[in-house]
Amino acid sequence: MTVFNRIVAIIAAAVVFAAAAIVLLVTAGAVSPGFLPVDWFEVPLEGVADASGGTLAAIIIASAFLLLASLFVLVLEFASRGRQPFLLISSGDEGSASIYQDSVRLLAERAASSVSSVREVQCWVREKANGVSISCRALAAMGSNIPELSAEIQGQIKGTVHQYTGLPVADVRVTVRYERADGKRAMVR
């Protein structure tokens, strides 16, 4: 998620949290409808304070739900920041060794880009029970043999990641797209 999107999500969740908390405080009688420094919300809050029966119950349930949902969004936004997932390489009496998942991704991308005919590559890494799963999207030169190229990329990534990290590679999925010729003659081998 981009920084802008994160900021918008945090601000929206904070506003919803504050509004739900104010409505709950007014329905409970802890504060009066006119306690806010701006009187924009005084009339709607008076309606909330005067509610009774089923309407009051619905307001309390909706406010409590919105309060909890916005709190959940805020916790997720702040908890996910700064923590990068890592993969355990080895563990023993002396301690443990691990590598950041992003480092494995970079290694896989470097391995795939070393294959001839690969112009660009983007990889994603997930941990599975039987090793790491790597998915890649590659941009290849026009005229490349896709089955051969895919097999070469898979072998290169699997060998490189295992050689340098010791991690077992469960699978490598490759999706290849030809680069646009844009007026150039297609390279045919």
Image: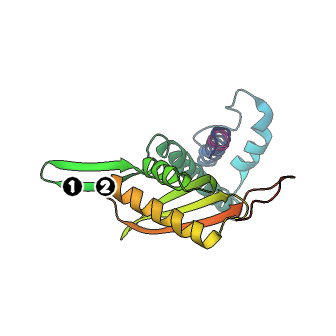
The residue under label 2 is which amino acid type?
Leu
Residue at position x 71%, y 33% from top?
34
Range of magenta residues? 5-12
Q: Is residue 53 visible to us here?
A: no
Residue 6 appears at what percent x and percent y?
62, 42
Mark 2 touches mark 1? (CB < 8 Å): yes
Above or below, comparing residue 67 to residue 147 in the picture: above
Residue 58 appears at what percent x and percent y?
67, 61
Seen from this angle, which residue lies furthest front? 189
10 Å neighbourhood of mark 2: few (<14), some, or many (≥20)?
Answer: some
Residue at mark 1:
91
Relative depth, front residue between 54 and 149? 149
Residue at mark 2:
88
Relative placement, left or right, of 88 versus 102 is left
Q: Indicate the quadrant containing the C terminus: top left, top right, bottom left or bottom right.
A: bottom right
Residue at position x 50%, y 49% from top?
110
- The number of numbered discs placed on residues in the rendered structure image is 2
The residue under label 1 is which amino acid type?
Ser
Relative placement, left or right, of 130 versus 141 is left
Residue 87 appears at what percent x and percent y?
36, 54
Above or below, comparing residue 116 to residue 4 in the picture: below
* Residue 123 is a magenta residue: no
